[in-house]
Image (cartoon, rainbow, N blue to C red):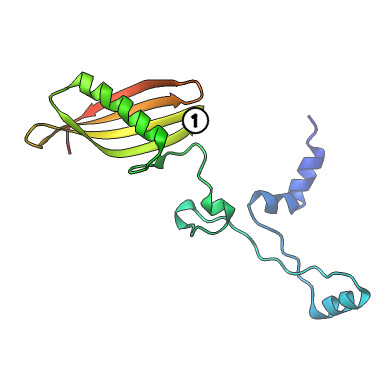
Amino acid sequence: MRFGPLLALLLSGLGSSVFAGETTTTTVSDKEAAAAEKRGDRPERPTRPTYLRPRDQMDGRGPVASAPLVGAKQDVTGSNDKHLSEVTEFAAKYLTEQNSELTYIQVKAEVQVVAGMMYTLHYRGNDAAGECLEERTLVVYDKPWLDERTLKSDTVTECT
């Protein structure tokens, strides 16, 4: 492999600003801008550096701020999603088979886009008196286009 042109680009400073996530700033004086306008040239305008803000500081403006982070878990608790309700029914049947004496209440639901959908469902198991006896985390892998749904893990912990 030849690294000559790439290395020259990086060492020239142009590549370093691109890889650092910054934009280059070109400034022109007022005299240069006036002279360029007289010639009919369009002068270069100064540009401001653009930095991506961390996800927790995004204010909802622009395509980057509104796009979900691919591959990351997203909280979908309380969502009216059809697939989520189907997965919740699947998990409820499983929990009833495991322990029919407890009443399970869904506390939290998360979804992660993988080669399908990975649902992480958090439940609290209460007895007849309403006292929490166990907490369960079910991970359900769903491929809706294949009509395939499998339970990947069931983790039982004590109530906190």
- Which amino acid type is shown beneath numbered disc 1? Val
The image quadrant that residue 99 belongs to is top left
In the displayed structure, does residue 81 sit left or right of residue 31?
left
Seen as rendered, the residue at the extreme right is 39
The location of residue 144, given as percent across then percent down, is: 47, 26
Q: Residue at x 10, y 31 (%)?
A: 127
Q: Position of residue 120 (x, y in %)?
A: 35, 32
The residue shown at (35%, 21%) is 151
- The residue located at (49%, 36%) in the rendering is 71
Q: Looking at the image, is 101 positioned above or below residue 18?
A: above
Q: Which quarter of the picture shows residue 96?
A: top left
Residue 119 placed where, x, y %? 39, 32
The mark tally for this picture is 1
Quarter placement of the C terminus: top left
Residue nearest the viewer, comparing 134 with 148:
148
| Residue depicted at 52% across the width and 52% down the height | 66
**25 in relation to 132, above or below:** below
* Residue 42 found in image quarter: bottom right
Quadrant location of the N terminus in the rendered image = top right
Q: Residues within 10 Å of mark 1 (few under 14, many from 20)?
A: some
Say what secondary structure mark 1 lies in. Answer: strand
Q: Position of residue 54 (x, y in %)?
A: 49, 53
What residue would you read off at disc 1?
114
66 or 13: which is nearer to us? 66
In the shown orientation, is residue 25 left or right of residue 149? right
